[in-house]
Amino acid sequence: MRIDIVSIFPDYLAPLGLSLVGRAQQSGAVTVAVHDLRQWTHDVHRTVDDSPYGGGPGMVMRPEPWGEALDALAEPGSRLLVPTPAGERFSQRMAQRLAGEERLIVACGRYEGIDQRVIDHAAGRMSVTEVSLGDYVLFGGEVAALVILEAVVRLLPGVLGNADSLVEESHSSGLLEAPLYTKPASWRGLAVPEVLRSGDHARIARWRREQALLRTATHRPDLLAELPADALDPRDREV
Ligand code: 6GU
């Protein structure tokens, strides 16, 4: 996968060179290029924003630099991602779909957002997804891009050593993951649940399923309500 990110704060994306996303770049699973939007400005002030038509607070990103950026970066098959609190809600399912793309371009807006014509024009030549992390407002799309790309890159083939951890983890089943424990068996007077040390794999699987259901009911009842009817078996309903 190739990912091009456009931002007026390219340094904000530096963490993509670190840790496991950095390693995924070294291994060739993904290529990430960060571009400064201002390279596509032509005035001496390298202007990227202006006041909104129709009035209102703040500034809006002008369309010209974005248009030139997308002219330079778009290839057949590119998908444009635009992080915005007005977008479709990001989810593990969206991460899985995005992990199947060949090329992503991420347009990180600042201020109140990007002139809508940039998105409308881009939609005439490529797939466009406006994506939101949740119901709160950030200063710009950069941190959202970090979140989205980390979720996508870890799903790419060869990035996670253990593919099983993708099957078991929170959200892949529609439920939150059960609590985890490691050594020591007793810590500050708190014991690891006995069942996990029993070696009885069927009992352990049952316990984890119960814990996942209880946690989901407590923390995210909305997820339980969304589960398809066949996702719960009769034993689940006893929990
Ligand atoms: Cl994707 N962008 C911005 N600027 N704010 C957000 C967001 C995205 N998701 C939630 N808040």
Image (cartoon, grey):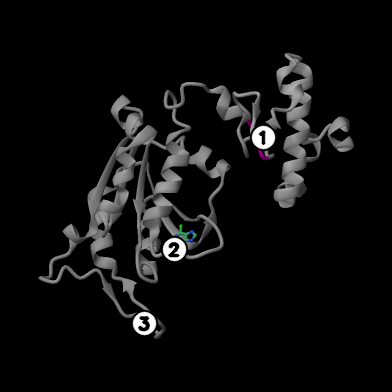
Which mark is nearer the camera, 1 or 2? Answer: 1
Amino acid beneath label 3:
Tyr
What main secondary structure does the magenta stretch of the protein show?
A: loop
Is 69 contained in the magenta span?
no
Q: Is residue 78 left or right of residue 134?
A: left
Q: Which residues lie in the magenta part?
A: 176-180
Question: Which label sits on residue 179?
Answer: 1
Question: Percent x, y for residue 209?
Answer: 75, 31
Mark 3 packing: few (<14 Cα in 10 Å), some, or many (20+)?
A: few
| Residue 181 figure quarter | top right
Mark 1 packing: few (<14 Cα in 10 Å), some, or many (20+)?
A: few
Is 178 contained in the magenta span?
yes
Q: Secondary structure at mark 3?
A: loop
Q: Which residue shows up at 75% across the image and 16% down it? A: 198
**First in residue order: circle 1 vs circle 2:** 2
Question: Which label sits on residue 53?
Answer: 3
Q: Which residue is mark 2?
A: 138
Spot the residue most to the bottom.
55
Q: Which residue shows up at 38% across the image and 50% down it? A: 126
Amino acid beneath label 1:
Pro
Would you say the residues marked 1 and 2 are in contact, meaning their CB atoms lie under 8 Å apart?
no
Q: Secondary structure at mark 2?
A: loop
Which mark is nearer the camera, 3 or 2? Answer: 2
Q: Quadrant of the N terminus?
A: top left
